Amino acid sequence: MEWLTAPFEVTFVQRALWAGILVSAICAPAGTWVVLRGMAFLGDAMSHGLLPGVALAALLGGNLMVGAVVSAAVMTAGVTALGRTPRLSQDTGIGLLFVGMLSLGVIIVSRSQSFAVDLTGFLFGDVLAVRQQDLLVLAGALLAALVVSVLGHRAFLALAFDSRKAHTLGLRPRLAHAVLLGLLGLAIVASFHIVGTLLVLGLLIAPPAAALPWARSVRGVMALAALLGASATFGGLLLSWHLSTAAGATVAALAVSLFFLSHVLSGLRYRRTRHAHAPAPVLEVN
């Protein structure tokens, strides 16, 4: 069993594991609403929209997390504002913001003559470089995500299944949508340091999507998604250690693999259940 425990005897791998567990718990509620509302493209756009803030923070020698938060806030405000434009579809607005923010980020990076901004960690994550203070930040982000999820659960639920009913019940769907975007931004900002922006959907989307066939409630999806995300983190770090592969990418790939495995097993269960409840064949007497 040494192969199973040896990697986690190293301090930086232990920190990486805890970081992945915290991020999985942060992504679970946001990712569940993203899956239920079919907002995967929005999640992808927001993750790439972090580039300008991160690039600017790196060039100025500032904190990358602060730069990511600023970009996430700009994306959230932009999506909310464009969503209120009657002649513009939401997908069009999101797409334009996506390209605009990504272009701005590349322009900022190109202004550095030596291209001193190392985008490798931003794009693909650097989970093994997590520090103790990063864990404290993630713990604070988890607490904020839980508070928002609990307080906004009823409004988010109504918004996911019937926005008109949410308005009838006085739940202020526009405000709920803006808060949900903020929750999504929080999850993405917390995740990009772990798996990078190119792979952030691995922890944001894959675990809730994998949990969906097996849970009987929205809260159940969130709990199972957090567990699956933590399992992907543990397994990804273990495989990365022994196979000498990129840690963040391995975690994201394992999370996606769990999604496909879940749906294969779900399909087999459905076929078995349907066969068990099928009416018995009637024998014809000739």
Image: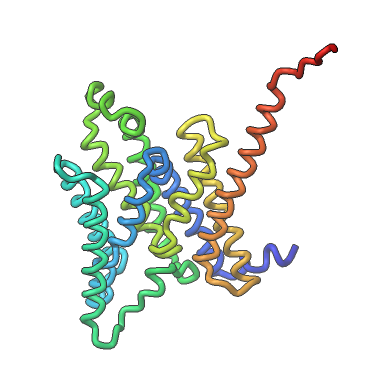
Q: Residue at x 37, y 52 (%)?
A: 187
Q: Which residue is situated farthest in the top direction here?
A: 285
Q: Is residue 133 visible?
A: no
Q: Which residue is situated farthest in the front direction here?
A: 286
Instruction: Pick whichever, 101 or 126, lies toward us.
Output: 101
Image location of residue 258, percent across then percent down: 58, 51
Q: Residue at x 45, y 33 (%)?
A: 218
Q: Specify the quadrant that holds the N terminus.
A: bottom right
Q: Residue at x 14, y 40 (%)?
A: 86
Instruction: Pick whichever, 280 or 173, lies toward us.
Output: 280
Q: Which residue is situated farthest in the bottom direction here?
A: 114
Q: Specify the quadrant that holds the C terminus.
A: top right
On the rendered structure, is 185 left or right of 17? Answer: left
Q: Residue at x 22, y 57 (%)?
A: 97
Image location of residue 106, percent across then percent down: 26, 73
Q: Quadrant of residue 17?
A: bottom right
Image location of residue 180, percent across then percent down: 30, 42
Instruction: Pick whichever, 116 or 164, lies toward us.
Output: 164
On the rendered structure, is 129 left or right of 80? Answer: right
Residue 12 position (above or below residue 178) = below
Q: Is residue 175 visible?
A: yes
Which color mode does the image show?
Answer: rainbow
Q: How many marks?
A: 0
Residue 153 position (above or below residue 61) = above
